Amino acid sequence: MLAFVCFIFVCCTCFMCFTFYAAIHFIICGDHCSLTYSAGALGGGMMLQGLSVDSSGPSFTPLVVVELVSDAKEETIGWLLNKIRDQQHDGGAELLVEQLGPGVGAQEKENPNLFLVGATWQRLLSGAEDVGLFKESTDGSMRAFTCANKHNFKDFGGDGDGFLSMAECQYIIKHELDTLRAKDETHVPGYKQAKLYPGKSIIRRLLSKRILIQIFPLHDKEELKRLSFSWYKKVKLSLQPLDDIRHYYGEGQALYFGFLEYFTFALVPMALFGVPYYLFDWEDYDKYVVFAVFNLIWCTVILELWKRCSASLAYRWGTLSRKKAFEEPRPGFHGVLGFNPVTGREEPLYPNIKRQLRIYLVSLPFVLLCLYLSFCVMMVYFLMEGWALSVYDQEPTFWTGVLLFIPSIIYAVVIEAMNLIYRYAAEFLTEWENHRLESSYQNHLVLKVLVFNFFNCFASLFYIAFVVQDMVLLRQSLATLLITSQILNQFMEAFLPYWLQRRRNKKMIRKVQKRRILEDKELPLAEQVRLEADMSTYLGTFDDYLELFLLFGYVSLFSCVYPLAAVLVVLNNVTEVYSDAFKMCHVFKRPFSDPAANIGVWQLAFEAMSVIAVVTNFALIGLSPQVKTYFSDSETHLILWTVAAEHGLMAFKFILTFLIPDIPKHIQIKLARLEFESLEALKKKKMLEASELRKMVQ
Amino acid sequence: MLAFVCFIFVCCTCFMCFTFYAAIHFIICGDHCSLTYSAGALGGGMMLQGLSVDSSGPSFTPLVVVELVSDAKEETIGWLLNKIRDQQHDGGAELLVEQLGPGVGAQEKENPNLFLVGATWQRLLSGAEDVGLFKESTDGSMRAFTCANKHNFKDFGGDGDGFLSMAECQYIIKHELDTLRAKDETHVPGYKQAKLYPGKSIIRRLLSKRILIQIFPLHDKEELKRLSFSWYKKVKLSLQPLDDIRHYYGEGQALYFGFLEYFTFALVPMALFGVPYYLFDWEDYDKYVVFAVFNLIWCTVILELWKRCSASLAYRWGTLSRKKAFEEPRPGFHGVLGFNPVTGREEPLYPNIKRQLRIYLVSLPFVLLCLYLSFCVMMVYFLMEGWALSVYDQEPTFWTGVLLFIPSIIYAVVIEAMNLIYRYAAEFLTEWENHRLESSYQNHLVLKVLVFNFFNCFASLFYIAFVVQDMVLLRQSLATLLITSQILNQFMEAFLPYWLQRRRNKKMIRKVQKRRILEDKELPLAEQVRLEADMSTYLGTFDDYLELFLLFGYVSLFSCVYPLAAVLVVLNNVTEVYSDAFKMCHVFKRPFSDPAANIGVWQLAFEAMSVIAVVTNFALIGLSPQVKTYFSDSETHLILWTVAAEHGLMAFKFILTFLIPDIPKHIQIKLARLEFESLEALKKKKMLEASELRKMVQ
């Protein structure tokens, strides 16, 4: 009976998934008209072909918007604009900047301090050299761009307009703004409390003192329209246009979508393997050994292959051998002014020992406390579960059968809520730990969130599997957790922000329509910029990766007892591609591109999960009735053999990781050639100098 | 009774060790006179202070000896010498080279084709820039040497003589000789079969065709005398003079001795912990749990700390951030002529797939076969062991008690012999695999030798510990294996070569004395060079590291059941320092220095051993009577808890590895500062260029 209810339930959830998928597709397609409605809004002013904004001053293409607080002092604004406009050798950024004119429906509460920043092509090219951009050269290899050799690069023609993508231009402008440094100012003019010291990044100080609200890049409606069409509006099955995504959003985003796609394809064999396993009579809980072994090999191999895949993508996008620049302290970092031992510049210093104390004496106990709380909640869930089961046993009807699933669903919702609350606490704590670098802040945040989410999501499953040892309950809990969390996630992640944004969008259009009749139903530049300024800010790929990480956990840890998990995850991933693409294009502000060469700390997280998966799967194998009958005479032998096999496979896994090169051979050769050529060039240069010297002596 | 015999035996072996140590010390000290006899022989001609050889031509200090076959054709010799002397822009090496005059007792069978190579200081300095040498600059940081900034380096005065150590000069000359390339020659003049192609290293071709017998650097007797005095002839206890060793032998050697010293000190706490454990009544085989836990933590921590130690040394010696140059194919590499995809130069190519086939279809089965053979030998040993035990049981006298140890001793000798034979087979096979790079050849050789030696040395111990489960026998076998192999090793490694060399030395002196009376009992240059040419060639640190690896294995795997192992290994290491130092100074030709930044593949090998140690120690803990009584009710619980604890510790170990930074903070800061400075310099240069351009336009 229980198995039957379970099956029905799964069918229902599958149906829900499909409906959900259809719904999202419908919304996207239905949205088509409203999209064309606003798409191309900036067509006149925003396209990169060199059309100018209809404002006085030199003609330029606005790329980035800088928003100051509405009551910012004139003095400050003038000083900042001068800094941005000044020549580089005077310590300026040599960029173009214009104030945004008032919108059509200009109201008093509208913020007048929105500035559009752009640059000449020459400036952008020299900026590209500053940030160490890699572009494809005429011989097909990726090389660091230099102005001196600009004609050796592919697609470089004329003055170089069209050579850099808009995302690259925006990244360069952000970098140039970020490296705008104070010279001898002791504070921001007009704000005595905003202290400056020689070498301090002005933008970071303005941000940390909240004089600067935000800096964000503008969308290019034309390109976005093309991208969204090829990405998710086409009906035919095709791969994602990763190169276009990278072109528009940068490498970090494109790598996420690449990983999502890769992960989905990697799951397909498992899903195909899982369906017959589930549907036919292999379902009797004791045949999962083969599946567990398959699981083990699968999760090792796919992670190794992903590294190669990621290296190929990063090479093609020119981020693989790009050098990391020296990292500035993050805006929120504070401390006593001193001298940085690396740069020798004045900079706030914060003793490492204090940070360590905060981490080990406050953050660590807090995390442990949260884990304990989560454990308590789990215990309450088991009490509820037991109660539901006793009700069902007393009166086994359809409704009491459904009741069996209620505790799991409630638990899944509570887990999601706890994860959300914990996330805020973790952010606060990590902020308080006062990390100097953004990367170190991110790593500590990821670690905190990962540990808690892992425990929260999987503790109950581990408990059921290894303490209660009830495979039926495990299967049921897994299905409920997986499906509920998927539905909640999609809702929180895409629908809610989309709905909010849609309301905002409509309000803006109504407001504009009130004042004048739109000719081609497009918003004028000023309105579009203001609309984008009000959009939610995309907070990076953190949550998206976290979701994939948990899904990977469900599949790799327990899918042998519930083979349909892979199918569900594949379905979820397909909808995820659409909903993520949709939210990137229409819900959030355009993010600055991030020149990532790999998925960073997440690779490590996934690998850690795959190690845990080996242990878990072997433990499940050891518990399986199939294996138990084989070792029916001695339980000790069973355990010893299981442990030995586990150690063997773990060793094999590490050897495999070692043997499979992380970078494909052909890319290794290309990288080696580049290095060799630069060495040879250096040698030749030295030789020339020496022979010139010799001639001079003679 | 058995325990008593065991104790007696250990005492005996300790005594032997001490005697051995005393003996080696006596020999070294006794040797003092004979050393002064030959020391300083080259004083007149070899010292770097600029005294010249008594031959015609420009005065120079001979640094490296090139020995051609005695019947080398005049044409070839002339061509090679011209290549070495030619200007760099004509494709030569611009070095100084002289033929060595005939010795005092010149005989017909003496090889006349010995050449001394040197260089001017200017050439050596420009060579130092070529090889990317790091030297200490005046501000205390390590920087890549460039001729342009030569006065910013510490100890650089005058023309720069004395700035480079002799080992560095010899390394530079070797590099310049190695990169002497063919231009349009199709073969070596005089040898039609020695094919050349544009870009082929001439020296490597001459070596592979055996026209060139050897290239070796000369000893500096004065410096060697000082070094050997501070190294091993002082009576007072002190650390090794690692900086002097590095100065004379280069970084690779110095790192080995550094590691040996570190390893010895790391063992001291364990030895101190082990002695009372062994001597008092903790000896009753069931109290080893504490020791096993200590063992586990110890071997993780020391390896992590060594990485930091090694990074500190490598930074001080300037090899940490030194860039690897492009690796040439090794001399023995052969294949069809084609174009290297990296350099674009002509070079033999050998398909990777063929090499993989050779590795997986021949080498791997061969290694497995050898392992099987070793297993068979082990089984024979157990038969012998059983027989000896039965004899002892029938007639328990002192002599039959001693007989008990005979099989172990025989087995230890057989193991050493098998290791030796296998070593040759492994070298042959790895050569046959035809690796393009020396590094890849070394890695494959190390892997083959390690796996076999590990199995050969430890299989019997594992068998006794986990199949027979006889801790007394384990203890006895471990002691016998450890002590026998130590004695054999010291004998094979130092005494035998020393004795051979001594004979050769005496013969030479007698020969010289026959002809003329030596004034100050020193050999003249020609004789000294010929004597050194006849000395054995030092084959690198491979065998030394292998020995340490096996000792580390004995200590980390099984020392909890035989706590005295650490003491024995400490004793062995102390004698090892002396015997290795002695053989480096007096038995072998001086090796070329090797700019190593770490101990390379051995770090990995030691770490793999420490992982195996965790598993082994937990298994031993699981087997200990102490733990067994605790879990007396259920064996299953015992195993499960042991496995759980093992997994926990393994996870902790990996987290620890991750948390402890490999490079100490203060060195990280120095490296970051260097990188930052070079970035800033580049930026400043670009800025200058831009402003100049602007001026020109105006």
Image (spheres, coloured by chain):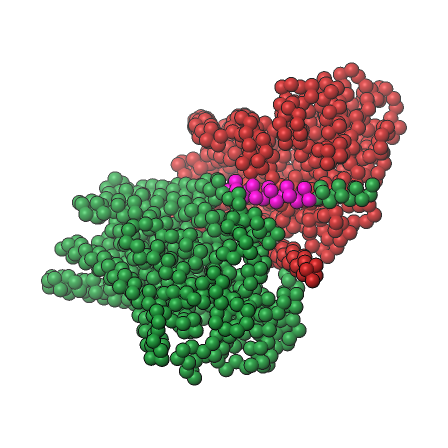
Chain colours: A red, B green
Q: Quadrant of residue B518?
A: bottom left
Q: Give the range drawn in magenta.
A: B668-685
Indicate the position of residue A511 as horizontal and vertical percent values. Answer: 81, 20
Quadrant of image for the N terminus of chain B: bottom left
Instruction: Tell how many labels.
Output: 0
Q: In which quarter of the image is residue B499?
A: bottom left
Q: Which residue appears at 49% of the width and 34% of the height?
A: A451
Q: Would you say residue B697 sits in the magenta stretch?
A: no
Q: Nearer the viewer, residue A663 or B533?
A: B533
Q: Quadrant of residue B86?
A: bottom right
Q: Which residue appears at 46% of the width and 40% of the height?
A: B659
Single out the residue that lies furthest toward the front. Answer: B519
Q: Which residue appears at 75% of the width and 49% of the height?
A: A148
Q: Would you say residue B675 sits in the magenta stretch?
A: yes
Indicate the position of residue B566 as horizontal and vertical percent values. Answer: 28, 51
Describe residue B346's horizontal placement relative to residue A660 as left or right: right
Describe residue A556's horizontal placement relative to residue B524 as left or right: right
Q: Nearer the viewer, residue B339 or B251?
A: B251
Visible residue check, residue A433: yes
Indicate the position of residue B220 as horizontal and vertical percent values. Answer: 42, 63
Visible residue check, residue B539: no
Q: Which of B189 and B163 is in front in this view?
A: B163
Indicate the position of residue A431 as horizontal and vertical percent values. Answer: 55, 27
Q: Is the magenta stretch mostly helix, strand or loop?
A: helix
Quadrant of image for the C terminus of chain B: top right
Is the residue B680 above or below the residue B463 in the image?
above
Single out the residue that lies furthest toward the bottom. Answer: B108
Describe residue B442's horizontal placement relative to residue A197 as left or right: left
Q: Which residue appears at 34% of the width and 57% of the height?
A: B229
